[in-house]
Image (cartoon, helix red, strand yellow):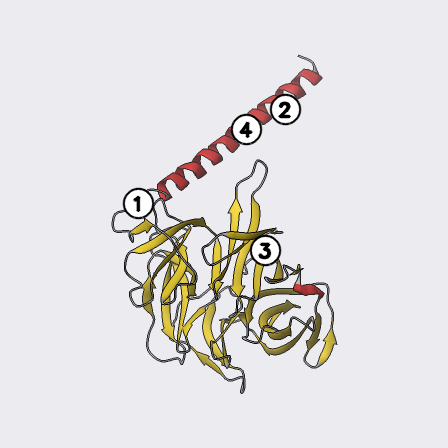
C-alpha cells in the first residue's frame, strides 16, 4: 500500500467515524425531544385552545411542561395560576406581551445550523412581521402601550455566566416597523461623562409608559450598569452599578433586577431599586435567579427557576416586591411570564 493510499484510507475512516458520531448525536437529540413531547405522570395539564393577548385577567407564559404543548404560548387565569392551562399553536423560546401586542423569539433547526427569528404578534397571536436574529434568543419585552418591542440575543456564548459572551439588543417601533438593530449605536453617558468602548454590550430592556424612556443593562470593562435611555434621542445614561436584567414596575417608580453576588461568581440575588433614592431592597428569594423578572402588579414579582428533576425546564415563582414574605410556587413548568 502506497503512502497516498494509506492517507486516503485514514481520511475515509475519519469521515465514517465523524458521520457516525454526528448521526448518534442527532438520534440522541431526537430521543430527548420525543421523551419531552410525551406527557409525564403528574405534569400540569394543558389543552389546545385560543390564547388571546387582549383578554385581561390572564397570565401568559411559555409552557415548559412535558407533553405535546411543550414550548407553546399558554395562559391561565391570573386568579388560578395552578389550574389547567390553555395552549396555543405558537411555540417560542422567549415570549412577552402587553396591550395586545406580543413578541415571540424562536429557534428552529436547520441543515447546517439553527435559525433564530423574532415574531411580532397581534392580539390573536398572528404574525405581523418576522425578523431574523443574529444569535440565540435571551430576553424579550413589549412597552406598556404596545408601541415598542425589544429583544436581546447572544451573538457569542450561551449565557451571561459564560466567560466570553456578546449580546445584541434591538428595539422595534411596532407602528412604523422601524428597527434599531443594536443599542450599541446609542450615545453613552457614564458617570457624567461621554463614553465609548469596543466592549460595550446591552441587554434586558424594560420600557416606561411614555413611549420613549427605557431602562437596560450596560456591560463594559467587566462591570454592569443600569442605564436610563431615550429612544428618540438615541442615548443612555448610567444610574447605578451591578444591575442586570431590569424590570420597571407598573407605577414607574422601581426597577427589579438581578444583582451578582460577589465578584467572579455566576450567582445572582433579586433586588428592587427605588429610582428616586437609588435605595436597594433585597427580596426574600434566596436562590440564584438568572431571569428578567416580570411585575404581576405593583406589589408582586414573578420569575423562573430551574424545575426539580426536569432537565431544561423551569417553574414560575412569585415574591413580594418590598422584601417581605417568602417565595411561592406560581406556575409549574413555565417561563417568560406576561400578565395580560
Q: Using the numbered discs, state the Cα–Cα distance from disc 1 to disc 4 in whole angstroms.
A: 32 Å
Cα–Cα span, label 1 and label 2: 44 Å
Q: Earlier in the sequence, mark 2 or mark 4?
A: 2
As measured in the structure, the alpha-carbon distance from the residue carrying label 4 to the one carrying label 3 is: 29 Å
Image quadrant in which the N terminus is located: top right
Residue pointed to by mark 3: 154
| Dot 3 or dot 2, earlier in sequence | 2
Earlier residue among tags 1 and 4: 4
Which secondary structure lies at badge 4?
Answer: helix
Residue 158 in sight from this viewpoint? no
Identified at 28% across, 56% down, the residue is 84
Q: CA distance from mark 3 to mark 2?
A: 35 Å
Q: Residue at x 52, y 61 (%)?
A: 140
Q: Quadrant location of the C terminus?
A: bottom left
Q: Foreground residue, 277 or 170? A: 170
Q: Position of residue 14 (x, y in %)?
A: 59, 26
Please provide percent x and percent y for residue 79: 30, 68
Q: Tell us which disc is closer to us: 3 or 2.
A: 3
Labelled disc at residue 11: 2
Using residue 269 as the reference point, say whether residue 153 is left or right of it. Answer: right
Instruction: Classify 10 Å Cα crowding around label 4: few (below 14), some (14-19), many (20 and above).
Output: few
Q: Give yes or no for contact between labels 1 and 3 (Cβ–Cβ under 8 Å).
A: no
Q: Where residue 150 sits in the image (x, y, percent)?
A: 57, 62
**Placement of 245 over or under 311, stated as above or below:** below
Q: Earlier in the sequence, mark 1 or mark 2?
A: 2
Residue position marked by numbered label 4 in the rendering: 19
Amino acid at each position: 500500500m502506497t503512502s497516498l493510499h494509506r492517507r486516503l484510507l485514514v481520511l475515509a475512516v475519519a469521515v465514517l467515524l465523524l458521520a457516525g458520531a454526528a448521526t448518534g448525536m442527532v438520534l440522541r437529540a431526537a430521543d430527548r425531544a420525543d421523551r419531552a413531547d410525551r406527557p409525564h405522570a403528574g405534569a400540569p395539564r394543558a389543552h389546545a385552545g385560543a390564547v388571546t393577548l387582549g383578554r385581561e385577567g390572564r397570565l401568559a407564559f411559555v409552557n415548559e411542561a412535558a407533553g405535546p404543548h411543550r414550548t407553546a404560548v399558554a395562559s391561565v387565569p391570573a386568579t388560578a395560576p395552578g389550574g389547567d392551562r390553555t395552549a396555543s399553536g405558537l411555540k417560542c423560546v422567549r415570549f412577552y406581551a402587553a396591550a395586545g401586542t406580543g413578541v415571540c423569539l424562536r429557534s428552529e433547526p436547520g441543515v447546517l445550523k439553527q435559525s433564530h427569528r423574532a415574531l411580532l404578534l397581534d392580539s390573536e397571536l398572528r404574525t405581523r412581521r418576522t425578523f431574523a436574529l443574529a444569535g440565540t434568543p435571551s430576553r424579550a419585552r413589549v412597552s406598556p402601550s404596545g408601541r415598542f418591542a425589544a429583544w436581546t440575543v447572544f451573538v457569542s456564548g450561551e449565557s451571561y455566566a459564560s466567560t466570553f459572551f456578546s449580546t445584541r439588543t434591538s428595539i422595534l417601533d411596532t407602528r412604523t416597523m422601524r428597527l434599531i438593530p443594536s443599542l450599541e449605536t446609542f450615545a453613552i453617558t457614564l458617570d457624567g461623562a461621554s463614553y465609548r468602548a469596543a466592549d460595550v454590550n446591552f441587554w434586558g430592556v424594560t420600557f416606561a409608559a411614555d413611549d420613549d424612556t427605557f431602562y437596560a443593562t450596560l456591560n463594559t470593562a467587566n462591570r454592569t450598569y443600569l442605564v436610563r435611555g431615550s429612544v428618540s434621542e438615541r442615548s443612555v445614561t448610567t444610574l447605578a452599578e451591578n444591575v442586570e436584567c431590569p424590570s420597571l414596575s407598573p407605577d414607574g417608580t422601581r426597577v427589579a433586577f438581578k444583582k451578582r453576588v460577589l465578584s467572579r461568581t455566576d450567582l445572582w440575588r433579586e433586588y428592587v431599586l427605588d429610582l428616586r433614592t437609588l435605595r436597594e431592597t433585597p427580596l426574600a428569594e434566596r436562590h440564584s435567579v438568572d431571569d428578567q423578572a416580570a411585575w404581576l402588579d405593583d406589589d408582586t414579582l414573578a420569575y423562573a427557576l430551574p424545575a426539580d428533576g426536569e432537565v431544561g425546564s423551569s417553574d414560575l415563582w412569585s415574591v413580594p416586591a418590598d422584601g417581605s414574605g417568602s417565595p411561592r410556587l406560581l406556575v409549574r413548568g413555565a417561563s417568560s411570564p406576561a400578565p395580560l
